Amino acid sequence: MQITGSCLCGKVQFDISDNFNSFYLCHCSRCRKATGTVHGANLFATNATINWLSGKEMVKTFNLPNTRFTKSFCTECGSPVPTEIKDKLVIVPAGSLDTSPTINPTAHIFCDDRASWEDALENIKRFPGLPE
């Protein structure tokens, strides 16, 4: 089954086979900085190929020097988009998907590095939309 995804502005669009190996919620400080939120949510597929439907020329990849950390994004809107790494590994930000994958999150990783305020999230108010 093919699943589709795109960036916020819609200029970058892609599809990929839904044969993910894992779906990690990463709490490391690098993922928090890269996403601006409490954790990264990324799907991993080995031997996968991204089919860029549009906007491939607008994708920029940042590699943090002296680490294995890499992130791709749309140069127009800044949205995270999939990263293709040598040996056919593809990392897909879950938030970039327009259709749901068949795999659910498989693990929280780097929990020892999580934000100090994360544990308080379960006890805060919840609203169905923007609070008035």
Image (cartoon, rainbow, N blue to C red):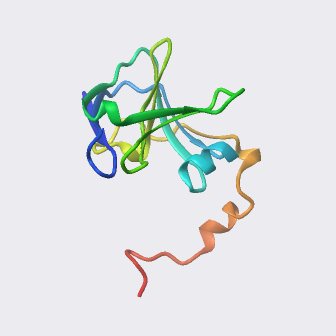
Left or right relative to 88: residue 53: left
Could you tell me which residue is drawn at 26 percent across and 47 percent down? 10
Tell me where residue 93 appears, x and y as whole percent: 45, 40
Say which quadrant the C terminus sits in. Answer: bottom left
Quick one: 17 or 72, which is closer to the camera? 72
**Residue 108: % across, % down:** 62, 42
Give the left or right position of residue 82, taking residue 24 as reference: left
Give the residue drawn at x 28%, y 28%.
52
Taking the view exactly as shown, the residue that stands out farthest to the bottom is 132
Q: Is residue 24 above or below residue 122?
A: above
Residue 124 to residue 8: above or below: below
Point out residue 67 in the picture as x, y percentages from the top left corner: 69, 28
Give whichever of 119, 28 is nearer the camera.
28
Q: Residue at x 54, y 34 (%)?
A: 62
Q: Is residue 36 left or right of residue 103?
A: right
Query: Which percent across, then down, holds residue 41?
Result: 51, 44
Q: Is residue 16 left or right of residue 72?
A: left
Seen at 27% across and 31% down, the residue is 15
Number of dots carrying numbers: 0
Q: Quadrant of the N terminus?
A: top left
